[in-house]
Image (cartoon, helix red, strand yellow):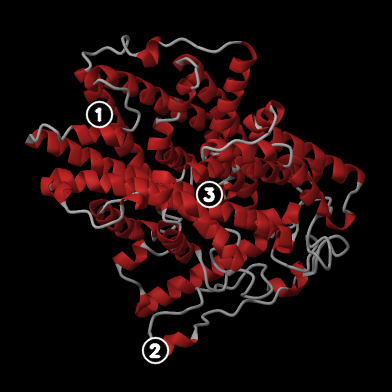
């Protein structure tokens, strides 16, 4: 048993490895008697390392061998599901608007996605090696209590973007309903105009919200098959939109100002504009750059997730190019540059023909699947892991996804954010100055400071070696490096928010330039200072000479749990096919 095994690191590791008490199995809440089959407490397997069931659950534990189901193809499907999105389709629009040519815009996209692909792959290897989620890994470098700040920062962002993507899905649903029933657009509006949504839009939003709930319940061991499905459907939809728009434009895009416009800025203005847009590309997926371990931990072997370094720059560049060419085609086809594909398929219905309506309906269905994939891959699972860190006794991944969907879709009123929340969108866009230091500290700690020598059991023990301070439970080195990374870009961040809202500030051009490269600066600065603090003020108690992953204990518990499940099934307790489809 795990609680009888002496630790080989008695001087440097916590007593976790030798004093773990098995979590009670099969425990149910008091509601079971009133609601048979339901337990307020989530399912508890015997935890590999958690001292009590308040510290972990079956989803929060290191992923056991039987649930490591993602191979390299799953990661290709994952990024195909993530890349084919409206936001990535439109990524070059803001770059061209500030004076870059379309070629320079694509150059910024290629370079930014190449760098982010490397960050995601290198950071993802930590999760693929240790098989623990991001909130648990964050405890190593930040300490137990400061890690909650890091996790909460990521959770809020994921939840808000989940709501924003749900609003985009609601717009697709509105197009679909109008294509099927043209009278749907004539529904009278009974919602105030300043709310940013109509009655028809709210109906569509609510229907999409309901539609996505069962998809959020797909277990993480099977969700890669949905990603694979989307990776075929999404390119077909976007290529169809591009092909139809190009056909209506006469088969050429050379006359569009999107293509013919040269770079209209020069010198230092051009340099800062390019760096600013490069920073925006990096920031676009800085969230997953931070918490990629939430997905890489499902890898069958660490090398399976390495394919991300190649896939990310290729797929995202293709999507960005198609967005540019479609916008250029739209100028000739419809008389104006159109970046949003939802607006384009909405025009297909204007003729009133059955063919136009059918095309719009099928395209809307495809975009519905696209937004569903985005909400699962980039938002809901990430938010669920973060929420689970705060209350693992009652929240697992599935409950966390549903809770995040409820909060993001209704509490944050995302339709109002998109309609009139320029200030809030500027806040979300500039949030990367906080994510950069968090990512850099985590990577620097694992690869440079500790050289991979960490203790997984201690990550689950609040009195283990990663507590750092008995009173504060925080690593001051991480706190100092974090603020050193994000403080200099902060004035520019505030200025960006004020300008988006129509105001002005007295922030100098230098402060604005630092914010323009906020993610790059904060990532580098925090990493360098974190290394320096550990170099000159090391925390010897948490340093180890080799890694303690606890893989033997994890494998033994997994084998026992699998054996008990098979025994239960042989006794006639085998769940139905539908139940097994949603079973982890």
Q: What is the secondary structure assignment of the residue under circle 2?
A: loop
Where in the figure is residue 301, as x and y percent of width and height? 57, 45
Q: Quadrant of the C terminus?
A: bottom left
Graded by Cα atoms within 10 Å as few (under 14), some (14 to 19) or many (20 or more), the crowding at tag 2 reads few
Tell me whether the residue at label 1 lies in contact with that at label 3, contact meaning CB atoms closer than 8 angstroms: no
Residue 271 vertical placement versus 558 (above, below): above
Tell me whether the residue at label 1 lies in contact with that at label 2, contact meaning CB atoms closer than 8 angstroms: no
Query: What numbered label is drawn on residue 34?
Result: 2
Query: What numbered label is drawn on residue 240?
Result: 1
Where in the figure is residue 260, as x and y percent of width and height? 39, 9
Between the residue at mark 1 and the residue at mark 2, the CA separation in whole angstroms equals 53 Å
Where in the figure is residue 460, as x and y percent of width and height? 69, 65
Q: Quadrant of the N terminus?
A: bottom right
Q: Residue at x 25, y 16 (%)?
A: 332
Quadrant assignment, res 73: top left
Residue extending farthest to the right is 536
Q: What is the secondary structure assignment of the residue under circle 1?
A: helix
Tell me whether the residue at label 2 lies in contact with that at label 3, contact meaning CB atoms closer than 8 angstroms: no
Quadrant assignment, res 363: top left
Q: What is the secondary structure assignment of the residue under circle 3?
A: helix
Q: Residue at x 78, y 44 (%)?
A: 481
Mark 1 or 2, nearer chain start: 2
Between the residue at mark 2 and the residue at mark 3, the CA separation in whole angstroms equals 36 Å
Between the residue at mark 1 and the residue at mark 3, the CA separation in whole angstroms equals 31 Å
Q: Residue at x 61, y 45 (%)?
A: 290
Mark 2 or 3, nearer chain start: 2
Which is nearer the eye, 127 or 267?
267
In the displayed structure image, the side of residue 44 where residue 579 appears, left or right:
left
Residue that badge 3 annotates: 295
């Amino acid at each position: 048993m795990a609680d009888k095994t002496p630790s080989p690191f008695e001087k440097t590791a916590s007593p976790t490895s030798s004093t773990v008490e098995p979590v009670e199995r099969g425990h149910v809440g008091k509601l079971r008697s009133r609601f048979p089959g339901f337990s307020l407490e989530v399912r508890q397997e015997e935890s590999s390392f958690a001292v009590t069931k308040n510290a972990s659950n079956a989803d929060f534990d290191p992923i056991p061998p039987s649930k490591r189901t993602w191979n390299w193809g799953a990661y290709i499907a994952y990024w195909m599901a993530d890349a084919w999105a409206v936001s990535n389709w439109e990524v070059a629009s803001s770059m061209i608007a500030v004076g870059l040519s379309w070629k320079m815009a694509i150059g910024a996209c290629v370079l930014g996605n190449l760098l982010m692909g490397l960050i995601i792959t290198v950071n993802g290897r930590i999760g693929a090696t240790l098989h623990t989620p991001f909130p648990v890994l964050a405890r190593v470098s930040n300490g137990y209590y400061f890690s909650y700040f890091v996790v909460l920062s990521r959770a809020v962002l994921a939840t808000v973007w989940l709501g924003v993507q749900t609003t985009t899905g609601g717009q697709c649903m509105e197009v679909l309903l109008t294509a099927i029933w043209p009278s749907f657009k004539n529904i009278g509006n009974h919602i105030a105009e300043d709310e940013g949504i109509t009655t028809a839009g709210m109906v569509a939003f609510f229907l999409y919200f309901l539609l996505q709930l069962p998809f959020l319940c797909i277990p993480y061991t099977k969700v890669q098959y949905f990603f694979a499905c989307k990776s075929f459907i999404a390119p077909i939809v976007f290529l169809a939109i591009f092909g139809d728009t190009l056909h209506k434009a006469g088969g050429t895009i050379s006359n569009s100002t999107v293509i013919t416009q040269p770079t209209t800025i020069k010198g230092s203005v051009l340099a800062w504009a390019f760096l600013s847009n490069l920073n925006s590309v990096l920031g676009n997926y800085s969230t997953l750059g931070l918490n990629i371990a939430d997905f890489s931990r499902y890898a069958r072997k660490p090398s399976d997730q390495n394919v991300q370094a190649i896939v990310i720059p290729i797929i995202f560049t293709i999507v960005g190019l198609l967005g540019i060419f479609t916008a250029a085609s739209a100028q000739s086809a419809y008389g104006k540059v159109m970046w949003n594909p939802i607006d384009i398929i909405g025009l297909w219905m204007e003729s009133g023909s059955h063919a136009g309506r059918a095309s719009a309906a099928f395209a809307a269905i495809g975009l519905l699947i696209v937004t569903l994939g985005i909400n699962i891959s980039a938002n809901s699972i990430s938010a669920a892991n973060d929420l689970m860190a705060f209350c693992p006794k009652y929240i697992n991944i599935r409950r966390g996804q549903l809770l995040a969907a409820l909060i993001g879709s209704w509490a944050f009123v995302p339709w109002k954010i998109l309609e009139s929340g320029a200030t809030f969108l500027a806040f979300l866009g500039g949030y990367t100055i906080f994510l950069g230091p968090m990512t850099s500290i985590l990577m620097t700690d694992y690869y440079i400071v500790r050289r991979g020598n960490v203790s997984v059991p201690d990550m689950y023990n609040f009195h283990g070696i990663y507590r750092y301070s008995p009173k504060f439970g925080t690593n001051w080195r991480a706190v100092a490096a974090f603020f050193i990374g994000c403080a200099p870009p902060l004035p520019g961040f505030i200025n960006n928010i004020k300008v988006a809202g129509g105001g002005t500030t007295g922030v100098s051009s230098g402060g604005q330039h630092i914010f323009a490269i906020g993610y790059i600066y904060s990532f580098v600065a925090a990493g360098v200072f974190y290394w320096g603090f550990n170099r000159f003020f090391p925390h010897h108690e948490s340093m180890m000479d080799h890694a303690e992953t606890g893989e033997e204990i994890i494998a033994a518990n997994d084998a026992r749990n699998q054996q008990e499940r098979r025994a239960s099934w042989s006794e006639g307790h085998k769940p139905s096919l539908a139940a097994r489809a949603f079973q982890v």
